[in-house]
Image: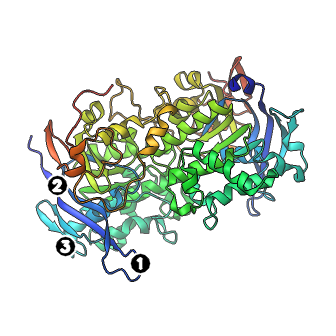
C-alpha cells in the first residue's frame, strides 16, 4: 500500500557538476562530478558503483550540499525532490543556506561509511538520536525518547537497553544500525547510504543490507546506495550507475547492466572479480585493468577511461556523450 | 607425491591478560589464539578466514615472530622457532606482507632502499649492488625501473602493495604470510595483485598463508581453507570440498553470507529477528568451562555442545572439523 503511494516520490538530479579547485602549485580545477543525471523514485534502490577516487562520495555529499566549502563548488545542475506531504517540487541547489537544515534529515538523510567515527563518542546514542528529533520538531523529552526507542527496535537494536549506551559499548554492526536509525528517525523520503557496509564483516554487512531492504519495503524509502562492490549492487539495487572519474559510464537496470555489460570499463570490472558460479574454474588468471585512476583522467576532451581501455582508438580522443540505447539504459562509449 | 610439511604448529596459544579493575588480583585472559594445531604443506596456499576479532592477525604475528606465544610450538622444517630467535637463517625464510600499503612503507625512504634493506641486512647482497637488485625484484612483481628513486607517496595503492611484496621477496622466503593483502585496494587493482601472487606461486617453491575475510578470493586462490572463530579452529578443508559442503555450521553461515555478482540472493529480511537473538558479536567474554565456543550463535546446537568442547577431528577426505554434527550433504 505504502509502496504504491511511494512511487509518486521522486528525486531527480539533472546535469549536476561539482568543481574541485586544486591547490596552488598545480592550480586549476577538475570536475569531480561531471554533469550527472540520476533519478530515484520512492521504494527504489539505485546503486552508484565506482572505484575509490571516482567522485561517488562527493556526489552523495553534493546532493545535500555538504561538499567541502572553499575548495569545491557546485557549478551547475539541479536536484529536484518531490516528497509526500510537500506541495511543490523543491530544488536543493537553489535553496538559501538557511533553508538547508530543514531539508537535511527531514527529506533526505545520509548514512556515512565509517560508523566508528561518525558517532560522537562522548554522547549517549539515545541522546544523539533525540537531538535530531528536537532539531526539527517540537516534542516532549519522553515523547522523543519513545520515538527513538521504537526506531532502534525497528533496526533490531534493543532500544530500551541500548538507549543509554555510549558508542564504544556497541559492536560495529550495531553502531551502523544506530546510524541508520538516526537517519530514519524523522521518516525521510530518501536516504543516501555512502558505503554503509565497507567497514563491516561479511555476516554483519548482510544484516545491514537486509535492514535497508526491509525499511525500503516498509516505508517506501528511496535509496541512493554508494558502493564499490558490484556484488552488493547486484543483490540490493534496482538500477545501477557505473561511475568512473566523475562521469556515469553506463547505467540501467541492475540485472541488465551486470549480466550483459556493454561499456569496456564495466566489462573489465566484472571480469576482474572471482565468480562463485559452478562452472567457474578457480585459479585461472583474472582480467586486470592496467594502470590506475589518475588525476589526468579528469581532463576534458577525451574519454575519461581512455588510458586504461582495451578498445581505445583515435576516435576516443573527443568528449563522449552519454547516449540512450534503450528507454532505461544509457552508455558513454562509441566503440560498442 | 610425498607432501613436504614446511610449517607445523602444535597447540599454539596466545592469551592477553587484563584486569577487571585496579584492585583486581585475579586476572582474566582474552584467548586471542587458543590451542591451534595445523600444518602448511610446501607450495600451497593456506587460507585463514574468519570475522574481525577471531584471532587471525594474532596468529600471523605469532608465526612471523613479531609477538611472543603463551604456550605451544611452531616448527619450521622440524626446527623449533621462538619469539626473539636469533637464528636469522630461519627467520628470513618467513616473511610477511601487511594489510595496509599506505602505512607499512617508510615514507622517508626511496623505493630501492625499502626493497633492498632486508637483503643487505641479511648479507644476501653487498650494499653497492642494491640498485640492480631492486630493479630485478621490481621486474618480478611487474613494476618498471623508473620508480626506484620515488618515494612511497608518489605511488598508487596497487604499486605500493607490489613494493611491499617485492620487499618481502628480497630475502628469498619460502613462506609468505599475507595479512589481507588486497582488502585495502580497489577491485581492479586487487586482480593485478592476485594474478601476481598466482604467478609467483607457479614459479616455484613459495607457500602462502593467506589471511582474508573474502571467501570469493579464497575460492579463487586457495588450496586449503582454515576457518577460525574466537581463537579456535573450526574447520580445515581442501578448498573445493569446502565450497561444496562447508562442514561446520559456522562455515555454512560464512558461505551463505557471500554475495556475488553472478546470482541474486533474495535478501530475506524476515529472518533478521531470529539472527538478532543469537548475538553476532564474537564473544570475548570468558566462556563457561567446557562447551563449544560457537554454541551461542550455532543453529545446529544440541545439549551435548553446552557441556563438552568438540575436539578438532578428522572427518575423512583430509578434512578436520571441531563439531559434533558436521554437515556431509552437498550445499546447493
Residue at mark 3: chain: B
Residue A126 picture location, percent across and down: 64, 57
Ranked by sequence position, the earlier of labels 2 and 1 is 2
Q: Quick one: SS at disc 2? A: strand
Residue B316 seen in render: yes
User: Callout 1 environment at 10 Å: few (<14), some (14 to 19), or many (20+)?
Assistant: few
Residue at the image point whose x is 71% and y is 17% from the top: A327
Marks 2 and 3 on same chain: yes
User: Callout 3 environment at 10 Å: few (<14), some (14 to 19), or many (20+)?
Assistant: few
- Identify the residue under disc 3: B87
Residue at the image point whose x is 13% and y is 42% from the top: B314
Q: Quick one: SS at disc 1? A: loop
Mark drawn on residue B6: 2
- Identify the residue under disc 1: B21
User: Callout 2 environment at 10 Å: few (<14), some (14 to 19), or many (20+)?
Assistant: some
Q: Nearer the viewer, residue A320 or B225?
A: B225
Residue at mark 2: chain: B
Amino acid at each position: 500500500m505504502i509502496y504504491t503511494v511511494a512511487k509518486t516520490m521522486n528525486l531527480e538530479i539533472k546535469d549536476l557538476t561539482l568543481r574541485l579547485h586544486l591547490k596552488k602549485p598545480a592550480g586549476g580545477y577538475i570536475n569531480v562530478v561531471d554533469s550527472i543525471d540520476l533519478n530515484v523514485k520512492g521504494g527504489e534502490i539505485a546503486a552508484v558503483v565506482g572505484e575509490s577516487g571516482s567522485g561517488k562520495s562527493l556526489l552523495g555529499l553534493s546532493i545535500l550540499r555538504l561538499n567541502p566549502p572553499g575548495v569545491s563548488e557546485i557549478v551547475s545542475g539541479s536536484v529536484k525532490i518531490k516528497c509526500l506531504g510537500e506541495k511543490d517540487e523543491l530544488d536543493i541547489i537553489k535553496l538559501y543556506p538557511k533553508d538547508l537544515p530543514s531539508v537535511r534529515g527531514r527529506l533526505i538523510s545520509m548514512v556515512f561509511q565509517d560508523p566508528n567515527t561518525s558517532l560522537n563518542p562522548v554522547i549517549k546514542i539515545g541522546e544523539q538520536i533525540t537531538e535530531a528529533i528536537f532539531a526539527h520538531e517540537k516534542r516532549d523529552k519522553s515523547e522523543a525518547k519513545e520515538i527513538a526507542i521504537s526506531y532502534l527496535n525497528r533496526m533490531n537494536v534493543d532500544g530500551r537497553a541500548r538507549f543509554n549506551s555510549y558508542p564504544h559499548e556497541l559492536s560495529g554492526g550495531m553502531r551502523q544500525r544506530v546510524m541508520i536509525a538516526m537517519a530514519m528517525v524523522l521518516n525521510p523520503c530518501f536516504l543516501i547510504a555512502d558505503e554503509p557496509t565497507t567497514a563491516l564483516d561479511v555476516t554483519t554487512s548482510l544484516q545491514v543490507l537486509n535492514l535497508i531492504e526491509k525499511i525500503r519495503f516498509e516505508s517506501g524509502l528511496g535509496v541512493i546506495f554508494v558502493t564499490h562492490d558490484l556484488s552488493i549492487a547486484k543483490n540490493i539495487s534496482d538500477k545501477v550507475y557505473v561511475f568512473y572519474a566523475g562521469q556515469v559510464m553506463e547505467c540501467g537496470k541492475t540485472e541488465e547492466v551486470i549480466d550483459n555489460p556493454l561499456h569496456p570499463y564495466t566489462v573489465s570490472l566484472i571480469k576482474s572479480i572471482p565468480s562463485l558460479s559452478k562452472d567457474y574454474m578457480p585459479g585461472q588468471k583474472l582480467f586486470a585493468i592496467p594502470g590506475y585512476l589518475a588525476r589526468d583522467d579528469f581532463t576534458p576532451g577525451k574519454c575519461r577511461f581512455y588510458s586504461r581501455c582495451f578498445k581505445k582508438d583515435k576516435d576516443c580522443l573527443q568528449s563522449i556523450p552519454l547516449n540512450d540505447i534503450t528507454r532505461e539504459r544509457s552508455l558513454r562509449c562509441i566503440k560498442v | 607425491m610425498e607432501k613436504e610439511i614446511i610449517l607445523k604448529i602444535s597447540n599454539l596459544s596466545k592469551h592477553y591478560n587484563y584486569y577487571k579493575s585496579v584492585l583486581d588480583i585475579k586476572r582474566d585472559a582474552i584467548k586471542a589464539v587458543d590451542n591451534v594445531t595445523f600444518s602448511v604443506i610446501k607450495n600451497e596456499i593456506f587460507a585463514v578466514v574468519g570475522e574481525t576479532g577471531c584471532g587471525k592477525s594474532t596468529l600471523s604475528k605469532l608465526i612471523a615472530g613479531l609477538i611472543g606465544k603463551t604456550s605451544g610450538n611452531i616448527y619450521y622444517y622440524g626446527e623449533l622457532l621462538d619469539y626473539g630467535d636469533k637464528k636469522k637463517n630461519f627467520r628470513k625464510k618467513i616473511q610477511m606482507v601487511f594489510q595496509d600499503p599506505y602505512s607499512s612503507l617508510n615514507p622517508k625512504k626511496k623505493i630501492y632502499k625499502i626493497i633492498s634493506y632486508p637483503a643487505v641486512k641479511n648479507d644476501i647482497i653487498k650494499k653497492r649492488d642494491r640498485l640492480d637488485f631492486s630493479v630485478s625484484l621490481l621486474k618480478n612483481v611487474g613494476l618498471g625501473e623508473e620508480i626506484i628513486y620515488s618515494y612511497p607517496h608518489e605511488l598508487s595503492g596497487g604499486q605500493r602493495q607490489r613494493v611491499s611484496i617485492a620487499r618481502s621477496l628480497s630475502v628469498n622466503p619460502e613462506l609468505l604470510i599475507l595479512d589481507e593483502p588486497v582488502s585495502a585496494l580497489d577491485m581492479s587493482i586487487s586482480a593485478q595483485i592476485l594474478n601476481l601472487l598466482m604467478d609467483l606461486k607457479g614459479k616455484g617453491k613459495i607457500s602462502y598463508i593467506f589471511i582474508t575475510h573474502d571467501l570469493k578470493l579464497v575460492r579463487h586462490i586457495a588450496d586449503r581453507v582454515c576457518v577460525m572463530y574466537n581463537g579456535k579452529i573450526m574447520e580445515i578443508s581442501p578448498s573445493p570440498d569446502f565450497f561444496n559442503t562447508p562442514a561446520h555450521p559456522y562455515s555454512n553461515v560464512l558461505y551463505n553470507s557471500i554475495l556475488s555478482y553472478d546470482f541474486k540472493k533474495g535478501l530475506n529480511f524476515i529472518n533478521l529477528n531470529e539472527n538478532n537473538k543469537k548475538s553476532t558479536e564474537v564473544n570475548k567474554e570468558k566462556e563457561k568451562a567446557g562447551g563449544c565456543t560457537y554454541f551461542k550463535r550455532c543453529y545446529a546446537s544440541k545439549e551435548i555442545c553446552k557441556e563438552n568442547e568438540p575436539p578438532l577431528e578428522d572427518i575423512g577426505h583430509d578434512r578436520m572439523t571441531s563439531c559434533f554434527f558436521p554437515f556431509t550433504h552437498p550445499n546447493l
